[in-house]
Amino acid sequence: MIERTLSIIKPDAVSKNVIGDIIRRFEQAGLKIVGIQMRHLTKKEAEGFYYVHRERPFFNSLATFMTSGPVVIMVLEGEGAIAKNRALMGATDPKKADKGTIRADLADSIEANAVHGSDSPASAAFEIPFFFSQLDLVR
Ligand code: GDP
Ligand code: MG
């Protein structure tokens, strides 16, 4: 099934100049970018985006990290895009991520882990319209 998923290149990866490296991995896996924007999130925006994690002990630290520099936010489209993106990303903790994944290759820590990706169709349905209007997405 052709799906859409939300991807964020997090501040640690943007500051390391690896935006192109990450986008190349998506393109080589057959995922198409149908929306893209660069922005520096406010604390309120980061907290709103990560609302599902509001009870987690790392919530405040995560929201602060996500506002520490600009991010690149994308909608990726393709066959099984949600699972495909998660496989390219690797495990949350880069120490546990499989070799060759984005997080194993480029992430610094369990928090500064280079990329975000929607984890389910329900998450994608919340996350895509959080940042993109229908008019911002090509088809
Ligand atoms: P993901 O879906 O693999 O991104 O992981 P989660 O949805 O579980 O967590 C969301 C984000 O919170 C992660 O990508 C990390 O940036 C951060 N995070 C997750 N677990 C921890 C943790 O134990 N400590 C800290 N400081 N941050 C974490
Ligand atoms: Mg998640």
Image (tube, rainbow, N blue to C red):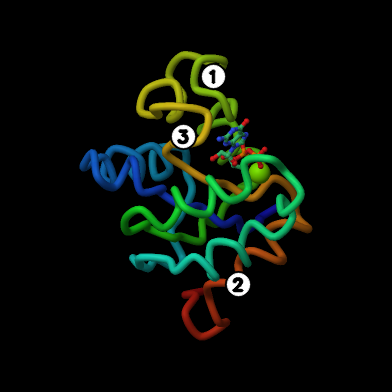
Q: Which residue is mark 3?
A: 113
Q: Which residue is mark 1?
A: 97
Describe the element under mark 3 as helix, strand or loop. Answer: loop
* Nearest the eye: 64 or 91: 64
Q: Amino acid at mark 3?
A: Asn
Describe the element under mark 1 as helix, strand or loop. Answer: loop
Asked if disc 2 and disc 3 are in contact, CB closer than 8 Å, the reply is no
Asked if disc 1 and disc 3 are in contact, CB closer than 8 Å, the reply is no
Q: Amino acid at mark 1?
A: Ala
Residue labelled 3 has its Cβ within 8 Å of some atom of ligand 1 = yes
Q: Nearer the viewer, mark 1 or mark 3?
A: 3
Question: What's the distance in space between the residues labelled 1 and 3, CA to CA?
Answer: 10 Å
Q: For the point 52% across and 29% down, which residue is it? A: 110
Residue 137 image offset from top left, x and y in percent? 49, 75
Residue labelled 1 has its Cβ within 8 Å of some atom of ligand 1 = no
In the displayed structure, would residue 76 be above or below residue 117? Answer: below
Q: Please tell me which of labels 2 and 3 falls first in the chain.
A: 3
